Amino acid sequence: MTWLPKSLQQANIMVNPGFLLHIITETPASIAFFLAPSMTLAHPQPHAHPVIQQYALLLTASVYIAYTFLQGLTNDVSRKVAAALAFYHLGPLYRAVCRIRNGEGKAGGMESVSRNPWLHLMAHVLCLVGLVWESGNVV
């Protein structure tokens, strides 16, 4: 693990990068979905807020699951969990591709990852690749 700082290498701490990428990507998303559900829709629809907030709680659960596997040895269970989380990232990837095909995100301004479909696509590609790599021979 040469990408880790020397202090972590010397401490013999193993960090699973696929799980770390999932945590980094989905923690802000789950907070945003829960606290500002209208911001996630093109047209605010208050009747959809409970569903979006429920989705936020599911994302939070997935972040907690990833956190439990963040450090530790890779085994059959962690590989299967990584494969399941990788499968989840196909949904946001598809949504980002649809947004790009519909012409969103042509301006190259500084936007949040959720607002810029190209950044959104890249974040989920990284998560998918990291988790597929983490899943090893399961996928």
Image: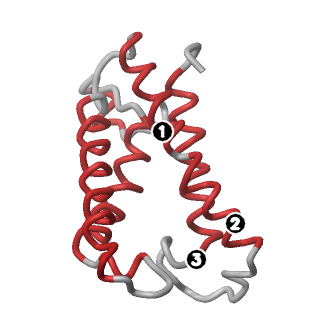
Task: Compare residues 110 and 76 and report the one nearer the observer.
Answer: 76
**Label 2 environment density (alpha carbons within 10 Å; few <14, some 14–19, many ≥20):** few
On residue 116, which mark appears? 3
Q: Secondary structure at mark 2?
A: helix
Residue at 29 percent across and 73 percent down: it is: 49
Front in this rendered view, residue 121 or 90: 90
* Residue 79 locus on image (x, y percent): 45, 19
> Callout 1: few (<14), some (14-19), or many (20+) C-alpha neighbours within 10 Å?
few
The secondary element bearing badge 3 is classed as loop
According to the image, label 2 marks what residue? 98
Q: Amino acid at mark 2?
A: Cys
Relative placement, left or right, of 79 versus 14 is right
Q: Nearer the viewer, mark 3 or mark 2?
A: 2
Amino acid found under the numbered disc labelled 3: Asn
Secondary element under disc 1, as helix, strand or loop, is: loop
Q: State the separation of the CA atoms marked 3 and 1.
A: 28 Å
Tell me what residue is drawn at x 35 percent, y 82 percent: 38
Say if mark 3 contacts mark 1, CB within 8 Å.
Answer: no
Disc 3 to disc 2, how far (Cα)? Answer: 12 Å
Which circle's residue, 3 or 1, is located before the other in the chain? 1
Q: Earlier in the sequence, mark 2 or mark 1?
A: 1
Front: mark 3 or 1: 3
Query: Are there few (<14), some (14-19), or many (20+) residues within 10 Å of tag 3?
Result: many
Identify the coloring: secondary structure
Q: Quadrant of residue 103?
A: bottom right
Near-viewer residue (97 or 112) = 97
Q: Nearer the viewer, mark 2 or mark 1?
A: 2
Q: Which residue is mark 1?
A: 3
Q: Where is residue 12 drawn, in percent x and y? A: 28, 22
